[in-house]
Image (cartoon, rainbow, N blue to C red):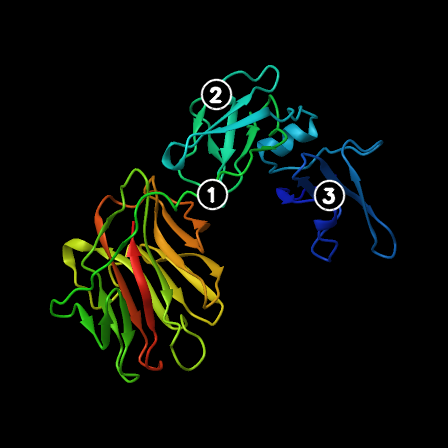
């Protein structure tokens, strides 16, 4: 009788790790709801894996299974996908409706996944999706002892939503410490001394609690010398109440261009994820209409924080370079919406 810690999920059969770390008794839950069980090993160490139930194989002794895996082993049903998904509205008023999966007629039976986001419970039909760009997924959620999660249905793509409204050019602060080590030309700011850290604060603000997408947008100074144009810059949303700022110590959302192709994202100082970028990208940093940090690249949503909404407050845009950079690194055509 095998007694193993079993709680493994993989995308498909090909993703099952056939390594020395995998042993007889291991069980894997696939994304399609199938359960695969390592039921024996040949003399040469070759693992034999089959889909449950396996004729003649008893599963007594498998412990620490999560409820969905137990239900899959017990052959609880995986519901069909909902059908006839319909997008309605625009921007912050985007909604999604559908035809129910037979016998699953309550809104609470379902969950949805916005683009670049986590699965969330459905609370109404139609479900308010908000300002998103891309495909939204919908399925029957798993209920312990009743059914495992259902097959997924995908909506038509919601159109890019950040083009609505009016973008306005920002103004940079002229207060003490408003701009240090840089030169402002219109709504652009560049580093003017390679030996000095450049810091700049906008006068303009956005509100993290806005009910629509809101952001600051910018490009890299295309005339920057020395190769990478965003690299070694840090961009942050900072509390307006204590501006102008001289560091990112109190930043609520930060993107750090730590290499020529990679940016890191931090929420309230805690690392969340990485994104690729190119020097020619137009970057936007703001919130998604529900208080959660969001990043856009070239008008398309690239990341939405899966965490809780930011505390409601007005924030300025803060930019900082390192002091090992080259002259003319900076931001061009900085706007807000």
- Could one spot residue 5 in this view of the protein? no
Nearer mark to the viewer, of 2 and 3: 2
Can see residue 319?
yes
Name the outermost residue toward the bottom.
Answer: 195
Rounded to the nearest whole Å, what is the CA distance between mark 2 and mark 3?
Answer: 38 Å
Q: How crowded is mark 1: few (under 14 residues within 10 Å), some or many (20 or more)?
A: many
What SS does tag 1 mark? loop
Where does the image place residue 90, in percent across and percent down from the top left? 41, 34
User: Label for residue 133?
Assistant: 1
Mark 3 closeness class: few <14, some 14–19, many ≥20 residues within 10 Å: many
Report the front residue among 180 and 101. Answer: 180
Q: Disc 2 or 1, which lies upstream in sequence?
A: 2
Quadrant of the rendering where the N terminus is positioned: top right
- The residue that label 2 is drawn on is 107
How packed mark 2 is, by other alpha carbons closer than 10 Å (few <14, some 14-19, many 20 or more), is: some
Residue 143, how many percent across, how many down? 55, 25
> Which corner quadrant of the image does residue 2 belong to?
top right
Q: What element carries label 3?
A: loop
Q: Where is residue 293 in the image (x, y as percent from the top left)?
A: 36, 49
Q: Is residue 191 left or right of residue 5?
A: left
Q: Which quadrant would residue 53 be assigned to in this image?
A: top right
- In the image, residue 295 sits, relative to residue 196, either above or below, namely above
User: What residue is at 35 percent from the left and 54 percent from the top?
Assistant: 285
Q: How far apart are marks 2 and 1 (CA)?
A: 23 Å
From this view, report whether residue 224 is shown above or below residue 82. below
């Amino acid at each position: 009788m095998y007694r193993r810690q079993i709680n493994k999920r993989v995308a498909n059969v090909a993703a099952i790790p056939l390594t020395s770390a995998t042993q007889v008794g291991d069980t894997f839950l696939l994304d399609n709801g199938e359960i695969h069980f390592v039921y024996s090993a040949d003399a040469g160490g070759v693992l034999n894996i089959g889909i449950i139930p396996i004729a003649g194989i008893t599963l007594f002794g498998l412990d620490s299974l999560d409820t969905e895996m137990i239900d899959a082993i017990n052959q609880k049903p995986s519901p069909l996908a909902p059908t006839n998904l319909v997008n309605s509205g625009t921007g912050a008023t985007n909604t999604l409706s559908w035809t129910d999966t037979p016998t699953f007629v309550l809104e609470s039976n379902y969950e949805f996944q916005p683009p670049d986001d986590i699965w969330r419970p459905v609370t109404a039909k139609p479900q308010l999706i908000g300002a998103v760009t891309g495909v939204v997924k919908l399925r029957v959620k798993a209920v312990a002892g009743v059914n495992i999660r259902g097959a997924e249905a995908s909506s038509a793509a919601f159109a890019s939503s950040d083009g609505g409204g009016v973008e306005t050019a920002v103004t940079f602060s002229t207060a003490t410490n408003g701009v240090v080590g840089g030169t402002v030309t219109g709504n652009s700011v560049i580093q003017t001394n390679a030996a000095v850290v450049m810091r700049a604060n906008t006068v303009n603000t956005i509100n993290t609690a806005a009910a629509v997408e809101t952001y600051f947008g910018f490009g890299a100074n295309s005339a920057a010398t020395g190769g990478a144009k965003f690299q070694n810059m840090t961009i942050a949303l900072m509390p307006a109440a204590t501006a102008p700022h001289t560091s990112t110590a109190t930043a609520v959302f930060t993107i750090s261009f730590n290499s020529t192709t990679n940016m890191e994202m931090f929420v309230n100082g805690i690392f969340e994820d990485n994104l690729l970028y190119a020097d020619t990208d137009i970057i936007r940093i703001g919130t998604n209409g529900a208080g959660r940090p969001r990043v856009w690249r070239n008008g398309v949503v690239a990341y939405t924080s899966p965490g809780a909404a930011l505390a409601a407050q007005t924030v300025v845009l803060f930019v900082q370079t390192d002091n090992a950079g080259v002259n003319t690194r900076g931001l061009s055509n900085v706007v807000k919406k």
